[in-house]
Image (spheres, rainbow, N blue to C red):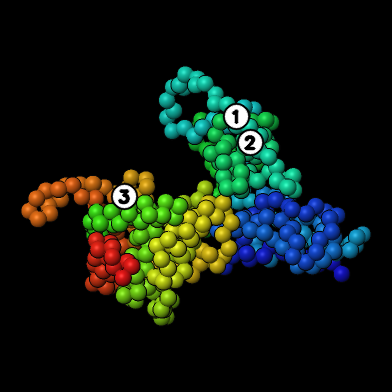
C-alpha cells in the first residue's frame, strides 16, 4: 500500500518548509531512513527521511517550493501502483517569487539608490574561480541562498568553486561569476533601476516573526557598564602562548564569565512562561551567530561546568555548522540566556533583542584602548562596554545590575573564572 511523504516539522518552531533539492528520483528504490530530499526550515537545511520502504513513485512538488507542515510532497509505494488519489492539490509557490519583467536579457544590475548616480567607468572583471568538484553523488554542494541567487542570475553552479565548509558554495562565491544562461522565467526577482525585491527565506521569515514577539510584548529595559579588560587580555595571551593549537577568544572568556555569573544570579537564568517564571538550575548559554541570511543562536550547554578550552572548541564547531546550516534542532534550542558579540565589527556599544522565552541577553561591543585614571594617573587601558537587555516581567533593575556587577568583577579579576 502506498505511503504519503509529508513535509515534516523538522524543527520545534517550523510551520512550513522549502524543498531545496530531491535526493531521490521518481522510480528510485528507497529504504526506511533513506534521505529523500533536503528541506530548508526556519533555522537550518535538514534531511527529509523516508518513513516507508518501496519506490518513490511521485515527487509532488518541485525544488524551490514552500509548503506547510503536513502537506504531501511525495508518495512511496510499489512499482506500477496508482497513486494519483494520494497526491493533493498543487502546492503554493515559495513566498511568491514575483515574475520578472520581460525587458532585460542581461544579468540583473546591482541594487541602486532611489536616485541613481552616473555609472562609473568599467572595472576589470575579476577572473571566475575554477569549477567546484561535485560531491560523491555527482551533486554540487551549495547553500540554499546561493542556489537561489544562482538561479536568479542564470549561473551554473557546476562551474563555481565554493569557499564554504567542505567546498560548499556560498553567496560570496558568486560575486564575480558571469551568468551562463538567462534566468528561468518566474525565478528572478523584480528588478528596476531603483530597487530589487527578493523573496524572504525561511530563516528571515522566522527572524521577523520572533522580533515582533519580542519587541512589542516584552517590556524591556537596558543596563550598560564598562569593564576593564586589561587582565583578561594578559591572561588570554598567556593561555594561547602555552597551547597555540587550542586558542581561546575573548568571546569564549565572556561566555564562561556570563555562565558563572548566572550561576550566582538565578533570577537572570530564567524563562517567562506567561502564567509562571521558570528558574533554571542548569546554565545553557545561547551565542548569536551571523549566518548567510540571518541569525541563529546555537547553545553551549552546562557552560558553567566547562573549561575555557572546552567552550572555545565547542563554540568554533557550533559556529561553523551554524553557518553551513547543519545544526540539529537540539543544538539551537533550550538556551537560558544569550550573548551577542559585535565587537569584531568595531561596534563599541549596542542593544540586543531578547530571544523569548529567555529573560535576558548581553550585547558585547569591541575592546578598545582608551585613557583612564588609575591611581591618580592617566594611563591607556583596554576597555569593554556591555549592555544587558532585561525582560522586566522577570528581571528587576537591581537584579540585573547585581548580575552585571558580578560579571564585571569576574572579568576584571580573571582568576575567578578558574577558581
Q: Which residue is drawn at 48% across and 60% down?
A: 314
Query: Which residue is pictured at 51% across the width and 32% down the height?
Result: 110
Q: Residue at x 44, y 55 (%)?
A: 246
Residue sitting at the far left:
376
Return the residue at label 1.
128
5 lies left or right of 327: right
Above or below, comparing residue 354 to residue 378 in the picture: below
Using the image, tell me which numbered label, if any, was put on residue 160: 2
The answer to which of 77 and 106 lies nearer the viewer is 77
User: Would you say 213 lies left or right of 49 here?
Assistant: left
Q: Quadrant of residue 78?
A: bottom right
Which type of secondary structure does the marked residue at label 2 adopt? loop
Q: Where is 375 relative to 159, above or below?
A: below
Q: Which of 165 and 114 is in front in this view?
A: 165
- Residue 125, how many percent across, how many down? 55, 24
- Quick one: label 2 or label 3, which is nearer the N terminus? 2
Q: Which of the image's four quarters has the N terminus?
A: bottom right
Location of residue 261 (image quadrant): bottom left
Task: Decide if residue 72 is on the left or right side of residue 407.
Answer: right
Which numbered disc, 1 or 2, marks the residue that appears first in the sequence? 1
Find the distance from the CA under tag 2 to the CA under tag 3: 35 Å
Badge 3: how crowded within 10 Å, few (<14), some, or many (20+)? some
Between 144 and 34, the residue placed more toward the observer is 34
The residue that disc 3 covers is 366
- Residue 82 location in percent, x, y? 89, 61
Q: Residue furthest front?
A: 242
Q: Which residue lies furthest to the right in this view?
A: 80
- Residues at circles 1 and 2 in contact by the CB criterion of under 8 Å: yes
Mark positioned earlier in the residue sequence (3 or 1)? 1
Q: Can residue 329 be seen in this view?
A: yes
Amino acid at each position: 500500500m502506498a505511503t504519503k511523504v509529508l513535509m515534516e516539522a523538522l524543527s520545534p518552531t517550523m510551520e512550513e518548509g522549502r524543498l531545496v533539492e530531491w535526493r531521490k528520483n521518481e522510480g528510485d528504490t528507497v529504504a526506511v531512513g533513506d534521505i529523500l530530499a533536503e528541506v530548508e526550515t526556519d533555522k537550518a537545511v535538514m534531511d527529509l527521511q523516508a518513513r516507508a520502504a518501496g519506490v518513490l513513485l511521485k515527487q509532488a512538488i518541485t525544488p524551490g517550493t514552500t509548503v506547510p507542515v503536513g502537506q504531501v510532497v511525495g508518495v512511496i509505494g510499489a512499482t506500477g501502483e496508482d497513486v494519483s488519489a494520494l497526491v493533493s492539490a498543487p502546492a503554493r509557490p515559495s513566498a511568491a517569487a514575483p515574475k520578472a519583467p520581460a525587458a532585460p536579457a542581461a544579468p540583473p544590475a546591482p541594487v541602486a539608490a532611489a536616485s541613481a548616480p552616473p555609472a562609473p567607468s568599467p572595472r576589470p572583471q575579476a577572473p571566475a574561480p575554477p569549477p567546484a568538484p561535485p560531491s560523491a553523488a555527482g551533486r554540487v554542494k551549495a547553500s540554499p541562498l546561493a542556489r537561489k541567487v544562482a538561479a536568479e542570475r542564470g549561473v551554473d553552479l557546476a562551474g563555481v568553486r565554493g569557499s564554504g565548509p567542505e567546498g560548499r558554495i556560498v553567496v560570496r562565491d558568486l560575486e564575480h561569476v558571469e551568468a551562463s544562461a538567462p534566468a528561468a522565467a518566474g525565478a528572478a526577482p523584480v528588478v528596476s533601476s531603483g530597487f530589487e525585491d527578493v523573496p524572504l527565506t525561511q530563516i528571515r521569515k522566522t527572524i521577523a516573526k520572533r522580533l515582533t514577539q519580542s519587541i512589542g510584548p516584552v517590556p524591556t529595559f537596558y543596563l550598560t557598564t564598562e569593564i576593564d579588560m586589561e587582565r583578561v587580555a594578559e591572561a588570554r595571551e598567556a593561555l594561547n602562548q602555552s597551547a597555540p593549537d587550542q586558542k581561546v577568544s575573548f568571546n569564549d572568556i565572556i561566555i564562561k564569565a556570563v555562565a558563572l555569573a548566572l550561576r550566582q544570579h538565578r533570577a537572570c537564568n530564567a524563562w517567562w512562561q506567561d502564567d509562571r517564571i521558570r528558574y533554571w538550575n542548569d546554565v545553557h548559554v545561547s551565542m548569536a551567530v551571523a549566518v548567510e541570511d540571518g541569525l541563529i543562536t546555537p547553545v553551549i550547554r552546562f557552560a558553567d561546568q566547562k573549561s575555557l578550552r572546552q567552550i572555545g572548541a565547542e563554540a568554533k564547531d557550533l559556529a561553523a555548522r551554524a553557518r553551513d546550516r547543519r545544526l540539529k534542532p537540539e543544538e539551537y534550542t533550550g538556551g537560558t540566556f544569550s550573548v551577542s558579540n559585535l565587537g569584531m565589527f568595531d561596534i563599541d556599544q549596542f542593544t540586543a533583542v531578547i530571544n523569548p522565552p529567555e529573560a535576558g541577553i548581553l550585547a558585547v561591543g569591541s575592546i578598545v584602548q582608551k585613557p583612564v585614571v588609575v591611581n591618580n594617573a592617566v594611563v591607556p587601558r583596554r576597555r569593554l562596554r556591555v549592555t544587558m537587555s532585561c525582560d522586566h516581567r522577570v528581571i528587576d533593575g537591581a537584579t540585573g545590575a547585581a548580575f552585571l556587577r558580578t560579571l564585571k568583577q569576574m572579568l576584571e579579576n580573571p582568576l575567578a573564572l578558574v577558581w
